[in-house]
Amino acid sequence: MKEPGETRNAERTVHALILAAGSGSRFGGNKLLANLHGRPLIAHAAAAVAEAIAAGVIPGGVAVIPPGATELICHLDTAGLRVVENPAAREGMASSLRRGLEALGEVSPAAGAALIVLGDQPGLRADIIARLVAEWRQTGRSVRPRYRAAPSEPGHPVLLDRSLWPLASRLSGDTGLRDLLAGQPVTLIDVPGANPDVDTPAQLNPLEDQS
């Protein structure tokens, strides 16, 4: 017998939303094209999403980039994502989140939730995506991971139920999901490992040393 949340969500889909429109100013620019293990940083997150698509966990999604960022397109397009530009990318992450959710509002079949992926997190794994989707299908609640190696940090990606998408209109600047989800029903699931942000070259170097 299906649980109530599973019944409600069984015919709805989760679509990925990769946020890749940041300026990378703390990195010195072109952060998402920086090399990590022989591939641009953005390619790692895109590959995990592509693996989830190939496995049938999600049907596809969109990626938000700044205007004219043609070097990012090939890595995102080949992952099975529709690339959309954010003309207001300089205003910060909030504008890209709104732009991406607007694009996902037009997909078919209708998106019941968005998997919010940060393009500068190369530790993203397809099995974590699958666990988030499964949890949402059972409960109908937004869900995010809590990584064993960093339990006190907000985990990504965040699977955002469509009922919460309108809250994005309240955000501005570089305000992200932490404030959006404050006080909202969000399930945490414990997962192994970590998925750190890369904001500076100093944060990238230790990852390069890892096999």
Image (tube, helix red, strand yellow):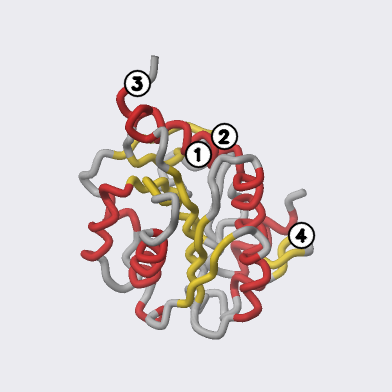
Disc 3 + disc 1, Cβ < 8 Å: no
Going by the numbered disc 2, the residue's amino acid type is Pro
**Mark 2: few, some, or many residues within 10 Å (few <14, many ≥20)?**
few
**Mark 3: few, some, or many residues within 10 Å (few <14, many ≥20)?**
few
Q: As drawn, is 13 to the left or to the right of 206? A: left
Q: Secondary structure at mark 2?
A: loop
Residue picked out by circle 1: 147
Residue picked out by circle 2: 192
**Mark 1: few, some, or many residues within 10 Å (few <14, many ≥20)?**
many
- Residue 151 drawn above or below residue 203: above
Q: Secondary structure at mark 4?
A: loop
- Residue 181, percent across and down? 28, 49
Q: Residue at x 45, y 40 (%)?
A: 145
Residue picked out by circle 4: 37
Disc 2 + disc 1, Cβ < 8 Å: yes
Upstream in sequence: badge 2 or badge 3 = 3
Residue picked out by circle 3: 3
Q: Residue at x 60, y 70 (%)?
A: 32
